[in-house]
Amino acid sequence: MKKVGIISYGILPYKGPHEMGMWNDEATFLVAKQALDRVGLNREDLDAVVISTMDGLDGITISNGLLVPAAGAYEKDSIRIETTGLHCVVAGVASILSDNADLVMLASSDTIETDFNYITNANQDQFFRGPLGFNPFQSYGLLAMDYLRRSKATEDDFASAASKNYQCGAANPYAHITAGYTVDEITDSPMVSWPLRSLEIARPSNGAAAILLASEKKAKEVIDNPVWITGLGASTNSYSGSWPELCGMVALKKAAQKAFHAAGIKDPKRDLDFLEISNPFSTFELIAYESLGICEDRKGAELLREGMTSADGDLPVNISGGSLCAHGLNSSGIYRIVQAMMLLNNERSDVNMKHPKRGLVHDSDMTIGAVGGDSHAILIMERES
Amino acid sequence: MKADTIEKEWSLDFDFSSSMGETCTEFMEGLKEKKFLGNKIGGRTFFPMKPFCNQTFELPTERLESDGSGIVEAFTVYNKRPEGVAYPDSEISLSPPFIIAVIRINDSDQCFLHFLSGIDPNKPAQLLEKVEAGLRVRPVWAEERHGNILDIKYYEPIE
Amino acid sequence: MARNVAVIGVGNTEYTSAKKEKKGRSELGRACVKSALDFVGRGLTLSDIDAFYFASADAFEGVQRPERSTECFGQGFATPVYSINTGGTAGGSAFKTAYQAVAAGIYNIVIVYGSSSLISTVDAQQILNSASPPLIEKPCGAGAIHMGAFFLTRYQEDYGITAEDFALVAAKSHKHAAKNPYAHVRKGYTVDQILASPMVVSPIRLYEVCPVSSGACCVVLASESQAKELTDTPVWIKAVSSTSNSFTVGYRPFEGFPMLRILAKKLFEKVGIKDPLEEIDYAELFNPFAGFEYLEYEALGFCGPGEGPKLVREGITDLGGKLPVNLSGSTLCTNSGVAASVTRHADTCLQLMGKVEGERQVKDARVGLAHAWGGNMGQFHTLAVLSR
């Protein structure tokens, strides 16, 4: 894949609902401006804007109308994609590699508190699952139960995975949840959808994030040693199917295969320095270890216990604290890319990882429901030493 | 920390109405008669009926009937009442905590979700064992049926 | 180096009144996608499609992210489905990003699907009002029809455009829609019938407004090497782009479509078109209100300000004229929500492919233009230049 650079970012610290004190156009403007200012560029330099949001989460129809001008799109080309932030990256990359743009702004914001149950039930089909009140929490419960059944993982392993994320989040100045919950606190929290407890499920956060994509030529003009996108893959799960199909993470595996192939990654455990995955529930991290090929089937809990994926391990997963610590329903993808940028830029002085060169970012719209119909995408980012 | 700004609250309330489509309509009509309809498409069997195969686009070749019984493949126990149901049908008759089950009906090549009652929802570890051993369940029909998925109130174990 | 990309196939379903639609979302989708695969033929199947670009606006559908449970987009093969929502222009936006992805080498064959967004709406005006800036403009209760009225009232005032002028351009669409097997309203209303129809919101009369239709539309895009194997009539995508206005509108003078003018200038420069009236052979322009067609002629440089009606009176934009426009009947006669923004591309391609039915085929159409308009008060335009 020809190179596209991520040359800058903008971010507002993530908070709880009602704590932003602004609408999403203002939040979008602030992060877009930050991204431009950081590298001395102007709105005039932009060729296109891509916004990552869903109408249902923004509380108005055609919300890109409000948001694209806030990200710099007046009299410019723009688009809004609802799937995930990484699907927006694909669009930005396509724009650049098709010679239609040199500089693309990607932005996303979460400042609206919605009726989460209602909005997420509304993306279930209207006839079979919707009327049962089926919601994301129940879908996560089903996946966690299935993992308990087919692997040797225990509920304590799930809580450990969650705690690992919370400990990391406590150290992240941009995370929403910095309480650093322990395993005991997690196993004491009330059960929501068995076997998942409330502290094992991500709570919606408010915040905003933006990144600037540039063609190879433009990237090298603007900064030294840019971060490059070297692999991208996207895939969507079938809404209906057999149970093994619905819980088998087909789309996650396929997206990873495509991204690994493009980036020349043969052994993800060896070839990657860190992972940032969108994990709306504790168990998903263990499932992802297997689906991404960093451990064998059913061995996710073992890998966790070995410590390899903790902040000071050989392959840290979610140094940012993951979705449990910052869960922007629109912005999780762009947020995660910014977290990865900070690691590749060595901006997190508190982090032990020495000069990481190559990271994986995952995003998914499981946030509004898993077990069918969900999309996954994987991005490989790297920098030359 | 709450910022010092005015909070605006609002609600969007629109009306919608749409055909369920031909296959779904046929299935729901079947529920009124306590029939759980399925179909055959390209050699595979589907309960509930499916309008076409999502790989080959083939149309169904045979209509099948069943009593809706099947085997539980997965479950979760949910501790709250379902809130904010966007496409409500009949009232949900169960109270929390209640079990949502993934059920394979009559050897279907696709699974189906519904509530499961008649099992202690406070003993999920036990339920997990039952599922691993093979838990067969059957629908409990509503007295009055209107042609929607809640014409089945919930499923119960077949002893 | 970007690759060349062509439209190789078109899919349509029967267009009818949204209230009469019997098919469910998945069934409609299957019919439309299958129709596109069959159009291409040569053994093209669902598993050959590398990605689907689904265009709609959730609020119209009454379902959040409807494509997730619409099972005709290759999800059985875990094909990636992109959900594009830019309101009424979503079809144009999806066409653009799909084209770019194939040109960039990310995918080889993709389908752009415009959803039949209106089959569930009970009151579309209500929903459009929710697209207004919430704090200040929305409480005035403006809906889609008012958007049309603001522009056309101004146009009348500035140039003395008459009721008959509007009826003339509406009649052109109605005449051709009557012969289009894929149009919804096929009544062929005459100028007199249009003038006699009731005023809805001045100056717009009932037969000068689009219906609420059902029906989906899709197009198949392929890279050059694939296109050469799969079709004898590839329609090459020369350029596609979009533009955005500001969000609040209260300050605007509503003088035509200046943003479209700027967009067209950029695109025409890019592809080397100096005289659009001479060099473009066919256009599909977005006309949910008949009078918009005039504003679009002028913004695209087919004629000077206020001269739109002249082009229709002189037959220049009719079949047999120098630059036929909207011989499908366009959005005025078939408005199935976001599908209408894909149909503009589909119908232009059908003309360039020489595959138009109902005696509406333009001879030797080589260069075509497809336009979409949408968003609150027409905040967005998309434009595509296509050629054989």
Image: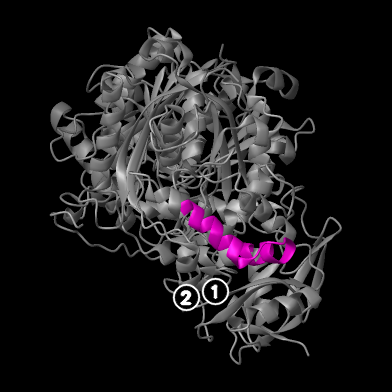
Please indicate whether residue A203 sits to the left or right of residue B63 in the image: left
Inspect the magenta stretch and tell me whether residue A75 lies in it: no
Q: Position of residue C341 (x, y in %)?
A: 46, 37
Q: Which residue is located at x 44 percent, y 48 percent?
A: A168
Quarter-of-image position of residue B8? bottom left
Q: Label 1 crowding class (10 Å Cα cut-off): few <14, some 14-19, many 20+?
A: many
The kind of residue tagged 2 is Pro
Please indicate whether residue C155 sits to the left or right of residue C228 in the image: left
Magenta residues span A143-165
Residue A194 visible to an observer of this rendering: yes
Q: Main secondary structure of the magenta part?
A: helix
Q: Position of residue A15 (x, y in %)?
A: 30, 52
> In this figure, which residue is indicated by the disc labeled 2?
B82
CA gap, disc 2 and disc 1: 8 Å
Inspect the magenta stretch and tell me whether residue A144 lies in it: yes
Nearer the observer, A86 or B14 = A86
Residues marked 2 and 1 touching at CB (< 8 Å):
yes
Nearer the observer, B114 or C52 = B114
> In this figure, which residue is indicated by the disc labeled 1?
A132
Q: Which residue is located at x 64 percent, y 38 percent?
A: A256
